Amino acid sequence: MILTGREVLTDFTNKHAITREWIENWIADVEGSTWKTPQDIKAKYSSASFVKKVVIFNVKGNSFRLEVMVSYNIGVVKTVWAGTHAEYDERNKTR
């Protein structure tokens, strides 16, 4: 997969250094994967959630969240947002 929006991940890991290793491993996994369906993601990340076109990953257990959009047909993963679980809840009150 091609990963875009790395600046979001850089800002996130600079702010929350405890997530750096998890994010680096996730990036390597994304770039080494060929996700064709949501089931491909679920096979590796069983706790991933799918809301409309957004995939939400639990980072470092349930302390942080990562939102991405996946274009399966062209093989692109776009980083949308990353933050704490509390920030995620606040951000998504209306979902």
Image (cartoon, rainbow, N blue to C red):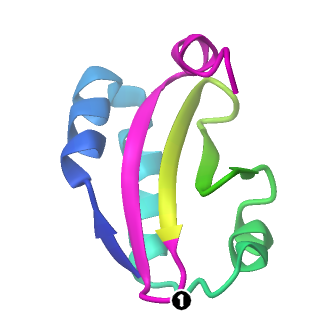
Residue toward you, 22 or 4? 4
The spot of residue 6 in percent (x, y) is 23, 53
- Placement of 57 over or under 42, stated as above or below: above
Is residue 19 inside the magenta stretch?
no
Q: Quadrant of the N terminus?
A: bottom left
Instruction: Please tell me which residue is depicted at 41% across the width and 49% down the height of the picture.
Output: 23
The residue where tag 1 is placed is 34
Q: How many tags in the picture?
A: 1
Instruction: Please tell me which residue is depicted at 62% across the width and 47% down the height of the picture.
Output: 57
- Placement of 29 over or under 64, stated as above or below: below
Q: Amino acid at mark 1?
A: Thr
Residue toward you, 90 or 61? 90
Residues shaded magenta: 71-95
Residue toward you, 8 or 93? 93
Is residue 87 inside the magenta stretch?
yes
Q: Is residue 74 visible?
A: yes
Q: Is residue 24 visible?
A: no
Circle 1 crowding by C-alpha within 10 Å: few under 14, some 14–19, many from 20: some
Residue toward you, 65 or 93? 93
The spot of residue 61 in percent (x, y) is 68, 34
Relative placement, left or right, of 3 versus 22 is left
- Hey, which quadrant is residue 18 in on the image? top left
The spot of residue 81 in percent (x, y) is 40, 37
Q: Quadrant of the C terminus?
A: top right
